[in-house]
Amino acid sequence: MRSAAVFLALLLCLSWTRAQGVSGGGTESDITQTDVQSEILGVKATSDQTNITPDIWAELEELRYVVIQHSLELRKMEQENTVTRNVFTDLKARMNTTENVVEELKRENTVLEARMNDSENLVKELQRENKDLKSRLNTAENMVEELKRENTGKLQNPQLPVY
């Protein structure tokens, strides 16, 4: 739509330029403007030329070609933009999924860390209890050895009870 409006504006400028050239010009600023427009169109005016009539149909054909090229480029860019949007949407969804997984892993990590701390505390408590039990066991073994020695001595010197 925009390219059609630009095309129409160019046609108006070209027809105005042609009308100015046919009427013989006007003021000095009109001649300068005509010279500039002729320069743009690729027509070189010499000082002895007073009437410049560019080949409007060739120019229109060239403008049509340029408009078609721009339309094709615009379609290509729109397609690329659509693909880029789809990729961006996909990446955004993947990023959200990854963020959710990271949050879940953080929660799991917190739970596992608490369980590990509980296990470490339990191990320390069991080590203290084991140390106490070893101490009690050593004491009991020493008592058993002492009782064995006492019993061995009594068996060698039996004393009969007196009645």
Image (cartoon, rainbow, N blue to C red):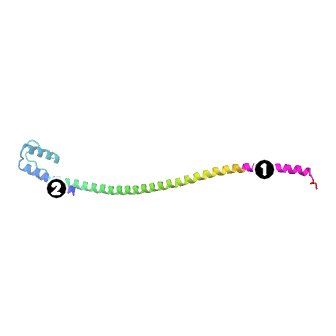
The residue pinned by badge 2 equals: 8
Q: Residue at x 85, y 49 (%)?
A: 150
Residue 148 is a magenta residue? yes
Task: Bin the neighbour count of mark 2 within 10 Å (Cα to Cα): few under 14, some 14-19, many 20 and up.
Answer: few
Q: Which residue is drawn at 8% across and 51% down?
A: 19
Three-letter amino acid code at the position of disc 2 = Leu
- Circle 1: element type: helix
Three-letter amino acid code at the position of disc 1 = Glu
From the viewer's perspective, tell me whether residue 34 is left or right of residue 144: left
Q: Quadrant of the C terminus?
A: bottom right
Residue 108 is a magenta residue? no
Q: What stretch is highlighted in magenta?
A: 134-159
Q: Which residue is drawn at 16% across and 55% down?
A: 8
- Across and down, in percent, residue 103 comes to 47, 54
- Circle 2: element type: helix
Q: In which quarter of the image is the N terminus?
A: bottom left
Task: Bin the neighbour count of mark 1 within 10 Å (Cα to Cα): few under 14, some 14-19, many 20 and up.
Answer: few
From the viewer's perspective, tell me whether residue 154 is left or right of residue 54: right
